Image (tube, rainbow, N blue to C red):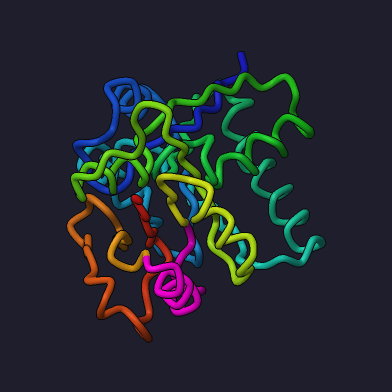
Amino acid sequence: MIGTLYGVGVGPGDPELITVKAYRVLKEAHTIAYPKKRKGSKSYAHQIIDVYVNPNEKDMLGLVFPMTKDEDVLTREWTKTAHLLWEKLKEGKDVAFVTEGDPSFYSTFIHVLNIMKELYPNVKMDMVPGISSINGASARLGIPLAEGDEHIAIIPAREDQEAMKKALLENDCIIFLKIAKVLDFMLDLLEELDLLHKAHVVTKVTSKEEIIWDVKELKGTELGYLSLMVVRK
C-alpha cells in the first residue's frame, strides 16, 4: 500500500482557524511535512500547528525550498523533495504537507503537487482547503470583500503602473499580495488616484504577530513578506 499525500491548509495564522478536517488529517498522518528556508528553521505553517502536533509523536519532515528563480536549481531541489516524500509514501505512510492559508492558493504545495504527478503518478493526493489570509484580513478589518454584483480582484503587487492602475479602476475591491517589495510604489499610486484612505495593510493577519498598519504612516516602512493590502472602494 502506498500512502496518501495531503496538502493541508492550516489557515492564515490563528491556530483556531484550521478546519476540523485539517485537524483530523494532522492527527492521523504518520508524517508531517513542512517547508523550511534553512536547516533547523520552522516555517510559518509549522508554527501554526504547534499546538496540535507533538513532534515526539510524529515523523517531522522539513523540506528546504530555495528562494531563487534559477530553473536548474529549482528543478534539482523540487526533484529532491519529491524523492524524500516518496520514501515515506512507499512505506505506506500518509504524509500531511502543511501550508499556511489554502493549498491551492499561491502555496508551496502547488509545486509539490505538480512534481509528484510527474515523477510518481500512482501516488494518491488530496487537498484539504484552508482559510486564506484574504479571508482573515476581511474578518479582522471588518471589511466585506464583495456583495451583489461587485467585482473583486486578487493581484500579486508589482511595479507595473498600468496594470496596477487598471486593477484599481476596474474593480470594487482589490487585494494586493506580496505588497512589501513595492509598498512605496503602491502608496504613491493610491495617492494619485485618491484611494489612500480606502486602503488597509495587514502583516501576519490573525496571528499573535499580527500588525494592522496606519497606511498614512507607512511610507518607507520595511514590511514582512506575509503582508497584504486591501483596497475597498
Q: Quadrant of residue 113?
A: top right
The residue closer to the viewer here, 152 or 182, is 152
Q: Is residue 146 left or right of residue 197?
A: right
Q: Give percent across and percent down for residue 10.
A: 35, 38
Question: Which residue is drawn at the image coordinates 26% and 76% (left, top)?
Answer: 216
Question: Which residue is drawn at the image coordinates 22% and 50% (left, top)?
Answer: 206
Q: Give percent across and percent down for residue 74.
A: 73, 58
Q: Residue furthest top?
A: 1
Question: Which residue is drawn at the image coordinates 30% and 78% (left, top)?
Answer: 218
Image quadrant occupied by the N terminus? top right
Q: Is residue 208 left or right of residue 98?
A: left
The residue closer to the viewer here, 141 or 203, is 141
Q: Quadrant of residue 180?
A: bottom left
Question: Which residue is drawn at the image coordinates 38% and 40% (left, top)?
Answer: 132
Q: Give percent across and percent down for residue 38.
A: 50, 67
**Magenta segment, prevailing SS (helix, strand or loop):** helix
The residue closer to the viewer here, 63 or 44, is 44
The residue closer to the viewer here, 14 or 221, is 221
Q: Is residue 42 above or below residue 181?
A: above
Q: Residue furthest right?
A: 72
Q: Residue furthest bottom?
A: 220
Q: Give percent across and percent down for residue 62.
A: 48, 51
Residue extent of the magenta highlight: 177-194
